[in-house]
C-alpha cells in the first residue's frame, strides 16, 4: 500500500479527532469526513508502518446513519466533527466509546460495567452559551466573521453557527456594519496590524442576558458610543466590553477588560445556583447538559446533609456549590486563582456559607491537608482536565478512604486508567453514565460512582464491634466503657479502631469485623503510643489482660 493508491475502505470506527477508521490488509486507515458504516473509495495520502491517512474520494455505499449536515460549511469548519452522523447514532457511539475504554484500558469485564443509558439532548442544536468569532478579510477584501477552518488559521465565513444562539448573527452584523462604516480594519495575523480580532458573545440561557466582548489590538474602537448604542438595542444586552490583546499570539483574550456599556458581567443559573460570568471567567458552555451532568454527580454522591465533601479540580465551584446545598461542608480545590475568586463570589451571591475554596494543585493541597490537619471526607468528587488525576492525588484518596468517590471525566481513556488504579485498591465501580455535553463533536463526559469496599473505622461499625464483642468470652468491657475510662483517666479520646488494634496486640480475640481487610491496607491509621498505653491501662483496669 503506498501513496496515491485508490482503495475501498469499510469504515468501522471513529478516531479521537472524528476521522473514520477502517482496515485494509491489516493496515489501519484514517479517512476524514466518513462515518461508521460507510463504504468509501479513498486515496492514500500518507503511510506509516501500521497505519495511514487517506482522503475520501467517493462514498460508495452510505452508512445507514449518514445524514445531510445542517450547516453548509460543516466540512470546512473545524468545530463539528460528526455532524454527518445521525444524532441517535452519535449517542450510541459515545456510550460505546466509554464502555470500550473501561474494558480496554480499565481492564473491566463487560458485565462489571454498570453502564446506564447515555444522557443526550432533546434538541442537539444551538446549545452553546459562548461563541468566539475571529474577524478577518476574505479573498475579495470583505470583512468576515466565522470560524477557523480545521487546524488552520484561515477564516470560514459563517455568522450563523448552528451550535451557537440565534442572537450571535445579529450582533456580528452590527459589529461588521460598524467596521465597514468607519473603516475599522480587522486584525491581520501576518502583519500584526488592524484592530478587531475577535467578537466574544455569551448568553445566559436562563436569564436571557447577553454579553459582547470586543477583542481588539488596541485600547479604543472608533465611534464606540455609536456601536454601543446600536448593540444595546439587541434584546437582552447587558454587558459590552473591550478586551485589549496586543500580542502576536493564538490566545484569544488579553488580560485587560474595559466595560464600555452596562454591567461588567452577566448572570446565569445552573439548577438554582446563580453564577456571575465576566468575559474572562470560565463557565461550562452547554448549560442544559451541565445541569444534567451535575445533578447526576449529586445523585451519585447521595448526600444526606451531614457529609464532608471535597470537590477537586473545582473550577469556579460549579459542582461544589451544587453539592453544598445537600452537604454539611464542601471544600473545593482549583489551580487557577481567578477561578477561585469566582467560586467564592458565587458562593457569596447565593448565600452559601458551607463551601470553602483553596487555590493550588489538587495533588498537593489534599495530601497536605490530610497530613497536617487530618482532612477527612465522606465523599470525594473529582473533575480533572483531560490528562486525568495525578497519582499522588489518587493515593491520598485511598488513604482518606471516603465511602464514595464521584469521578466526572471529559476523557474516558484517562478515566479508565484512574479507575483501574482505584478499583485495584478497594473501590468498586457502582454506577457509570455518559453525558453528551457536545453534540456533533466526538467529545463525551462521563460520571462514575465508586464505593469503598473496605471496613473502616467510622461509627457505622461501632455497633457491630460491641455486638460481636459480647460473644467473646474474654471481653469484659464494652468499647464505650473503655473509651469512657481512657477519657476520664487520661483525658484522651480513642477510636474503636485503636481499641481493637490494642486488643489484638494484647492477644484478645476480636470479632471478624476487626480483622484487617483482606488486602493488607497500610493506610489504616495506627494507634499512637500514648493512646496505646492508655488503652492498655483500661484493659488492665477491666481485668481483660
Ligand atoms: N468542575 C469545574 C471544571 C472542571 S475542568 C466546573 O464545573 O466548573 C478542570 C479544572 O481543573 C480546570 O478549572 C483547571 O483549571 C483545573 N486544574 C487543572 N489542573 C489542576 C490541578 N493539578 N489541580 C487543581 N486544579 C486543576
Image (spheres, rainbow, N blue to C red):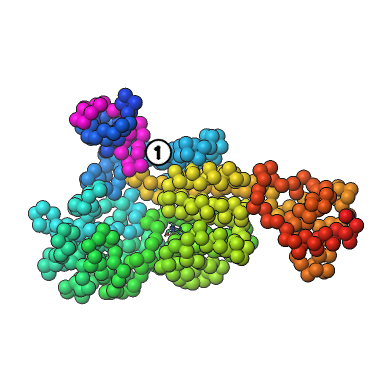
Where residue 14 sits in the image (x, y, percent)?
Answer: 35, 37
Q: Tell me the residue at 33%/45% (across/down).
A: 440
> Residue most toward the top?
25
Q: Which residues make up the magenta segment? A: 1-21
When asked about the image quadrant of residue 6, the answer is: top left
Placement of 489 over or under 380, stated as above or below: below
Placement of the C terminus among the 4 image quadrants: bottom right
Q: Nearer the viewer, residue 400 or 352?
A: 400
Dividing the image into four equal quarters, which quarter contains ligand 1?
bottom left
Q: Is residue 3 magenta?
A: yes
Q: Nearer the viewer, residue 507 or 250?
A: 507
Q: Tell me the residue at 10%/57% (across/down).
A: 141
Would you say 120 lies left or right of 312 here? left
Where residue 158 sits in the image (x, y, percent)?
Answer: 21, 53
CB of mark 1 near ligand 1 (< 8 Å): no
Placement of 419 over or under 24, stated as above or below: below
Is residue 214 among the parts visible in the rendering? no
Amino acid at each position: 500500500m503506498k501513496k496515491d493508491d485508490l482503495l475501498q475502505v469499510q469504515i468501522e470506527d471513529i478516531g479521537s479527532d472524528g476521522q473514520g477508521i477502517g482496515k485494509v490488509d491489516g493496515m489501519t486507515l484514517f479517512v476524514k469526513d466518513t462515518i461508521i458504516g460507510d463504504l468509501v473509495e479513498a486515496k492514500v495520502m500518507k503511510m506509516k508502518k501500521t497505519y495511514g491517512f487517506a482522503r475520501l474520494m467517493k462514498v460508495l455505499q452510505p452508512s445507514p446513519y449518514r445524514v445531510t449536515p445542517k450547516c453548509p460549511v460543516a466540512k470546512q469548519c473545524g468545530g463539528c466533527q460528526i455532524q454527518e452522523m445521525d444524532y441517535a447514532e452519535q449517542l450510541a457511539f459515545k456510550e460505546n466509546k466509554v464502555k470500550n475504554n473501561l474494558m480496554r484500558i480499565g481492564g473491566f469485564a463487560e458485565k462489571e460495567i454498570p453502564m446506564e443509558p447515555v444522557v443526550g439532548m432533546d434538541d442537539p442544536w444551538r446549545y452553546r452559551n459562548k461563541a468566539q468569532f475571529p474577524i478577518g478579510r476574505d479573498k475579495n477584501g470583505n470583512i468576515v466573521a466565522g470560524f477557523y477552518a480545521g487546524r488552520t488559521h484561515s477564516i470560514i465565513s459563517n455568522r450563523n453557527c448552528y451550535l451557537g444562539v440565534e442572537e450571535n448573527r445579529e450582533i456580528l452584523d452590527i459589529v461588521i456594519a460598524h467596521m465597514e462604516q468607519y473603516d475599522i480594519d480587522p486584525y491581520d495575523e501576518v502583519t500584526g496590524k488592524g484592530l478587531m480580532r475577535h467578537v466574544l458573545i455569551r448568553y445566559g440561557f436562563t436569564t436571557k442576558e447577553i454579553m459582547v466582548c470586543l477583542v481588539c489590538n488596541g485600547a479604543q474602537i472608533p465611534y464606540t458610543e455609536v456601536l454601543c448604542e446600536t448593540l444595546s438595542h439587541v434584546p437582552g444586552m447587558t454587558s459590552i466590553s473591550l478586551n485589549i490583546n496586543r500580542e502576536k499570539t493564538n490566545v484569544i483574550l488579553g488580560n485587560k477588560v474595559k466595560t464600555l456599556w452596562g454591567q461588567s458581567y452577566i448572570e446565569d443559573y445552573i439548577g438554582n445556583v446563580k453564577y456571575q460570568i465576566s468575559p474572562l471567567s470560565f463557565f461550562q458552555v452547554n448549560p442544559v447538559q451541565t445541569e444534567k451532568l451535575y445533578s447526576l454527580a449529586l445523585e451519585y454522591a447521595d448526600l444526606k446533609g451531614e457529609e464532608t465533601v471535597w470537590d477537586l479540580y473545582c473550577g469556579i465551584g460549579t459542582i461544589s456549590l451544587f453539592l453544598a446545598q445537600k452537604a454539611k461542608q464542601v471544600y473545593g480545590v482549583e489551580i487557577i486563582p481567578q477561578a477561585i475568586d469566582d467560586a467564592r463570589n458565587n458562593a457569596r451571591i447565593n448565600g452559601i456559607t458551607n463551601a470553602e475554596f483553596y487555590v493550588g494543585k489538587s495533588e498537593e493541597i489534599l495530601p497536605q491537608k490530610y497530613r497536617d490537619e487530618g482532612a477527612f471526607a465522606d465523599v470525594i468528587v473529582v473533575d480533572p482536565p483531560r490528562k486525568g488525576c495525578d497519582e499522588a492525588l489518587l493515593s491520598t484518596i485511598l488513604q482518606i478512604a471516603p465511602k464514595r468517590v464521584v469521578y466526572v471525566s471529559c476523557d474516558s481513556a484517562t478515566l479508565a486508567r484512574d479507575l483501574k488504579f482505584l478499583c485495584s485498591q478497594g473501590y468498586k465501580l457502582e454506577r457509570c453514565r455518559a453525558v453528551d455535553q457536545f453534540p456533533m463533536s466526538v467529545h463525551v463526559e462521563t460520571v462514575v460512582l465508586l464505593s469503598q469496599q473496605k471496613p473502616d473505622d467510622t461509627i457505622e461499625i461501632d455497633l457491630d464491634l460491641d455486638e460481636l464483642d459480647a460473644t467473646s468470652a474474654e471481653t469484659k468491657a464494652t468499647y464505650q466503657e473503655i473509651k469512657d475510662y481512657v477519657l476520664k483517666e487520661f483525658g484522651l479520646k480513642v477510636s474503636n479502631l485503636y481499641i481493637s488494634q490494642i486488643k489484638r496486640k494484647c492477644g484478645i480475640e476480636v470479632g471478624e469485623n476487626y480483622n484487617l481487610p483482606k488486602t493488607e491496607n497500610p493506610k489504616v491509621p495506627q494507634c499512637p503510643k500514648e493512646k496505646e498505653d492508655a488503652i492498655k491501662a483500661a484493659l488492665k483496669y477491666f481485668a481483660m489482660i
